Amino acid sequence: MNVHELLAAARGGSLRATGRLLSLIEGTGRGEVLTALDGLPDPGALRVVGLTGPPGAGKSTTAAALVTAYRDRGLRVAVLAVDPSSPYSGGALLGDRIRMAAHTADPGVLIRSLATRGHLGGLAAAVPAAVRVLAHLSYDLVLVETVGVGQSEIEIAAVADPVVVVLTPGAGDAVQAAKAGLLEVADLLVVNKADREGAEQTVRDLHMETDAPILTAVAAKAEGVPALVDAIEAHHRADTPARRKARAHAQLLSLAQSRLRGHPALEELATAVSEGRHDPYTATDLLLKALSTGTP
């Protein structure tokens, strides 16, 4: 099927067609899909909730619990789980998250892993396009779960509202999150695994670092999840044009860096610099020129 046929099938409920569209926007077919969407009526804004935080904090478990809660409300939910890219295949390493297996048979839930493929911002380069596709397919909510690799995670704030930062008791998570810049983009904070020792201290530490609302949860037992859903629904980001521009600025730079990293001229120019045939400034100018003209 061509892109228009895939869109028609996906809008008719075909998960297979939806998966094919998402595969296209991860590759060279992204422009064709987005052009096809331009010819469709504006579907309106789609609620995008971001989940980020250190590895092991329980982001996937929290995402699965949120999916259950929203499905209980009758909403169609999509989960975009952004995974590290395999150095061999370029594909997502973690696949369709094992922790979300309970939802895989539910036609009202779409779970999709996207590989970062060298993208520098903690989000796959295809995420903004994927969100646009899902908006046209009448999903009510998209959960974007990020890799959880540190400072570069701040790019999620350009895509999601709210951004939920998931932390765990002890292990210095509050301090590390502050150093990584996560607290700067956190709209809501969740201390997960709150049945562990040190949860109350972690909450106190966080209150010293941020004014954002702080909740506690044990996502594996669905404890605290209703309160988290209520907080997400009640949240409306108080924003300024300057902050919106700053988020867009970060997103554009990250996408541009990803294109530069994948440009065929990069290898040749790097060799030229290493062999002394070009200085790095000249090589950078040539790389940017190659990107703007579309030349190899």
Image (cartoon, rainbow, N blue to C red):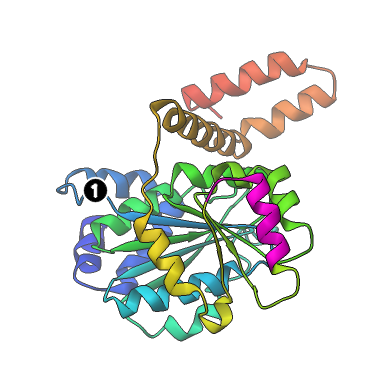
Q: Is residue 129 above or below residue 258?
A: below
Residue 54 visible = no
**Range covered by the magenta-colored residues:** 200-212
Q: Is residue 290 left or right of residue 244?
A: right
Dot 1, crowdedness within 10 Å: few (<14), some or many (≥20)?
Answer: some
Q: Farthest residue to the left: give it.
A: 41
Q: Main secondary structure of the magenta part?
A: helix
The residue that label 1 is drawn on is 37
Q: Is 197 within the magenta?
A: no
Front residue of this view, candidates 193 and 144: 193
Please give left or right for residue 47 compared with residue 147 in the image.
Answer: left
Q: Residue at x 37, y 65 (%)?
A: 20
Q: Is residue 46 left or right of residue 54?
A: left
Q: Residue at x 55, y 23 (%)?
A: 290
Asked whether residue 79 appears in the rendered view, the answer is: yes
Q: Is residue 107 left or right of residue 211?
A: left
Q: Is residue 162 above or below residue 238?
A: below
Q: Position of residue 283 (x, y in %)?
A: 69, 19
Q: Secondary structure at mark 1?
A: helix
Query: Where does the image place residue 54, in percent across and percent down from the top left?
Result: 68, 59
Q: Is residue 269 above or below residue 59?
A: above
Which amino acid type is marked by label 1? Leu
Quadrant in the picture for the N terminus: bottom left
Q: Position of residue 296 (x, y in %)?
A: 56, 30
Indicate the quadrant where residue 147 lies: bottom right
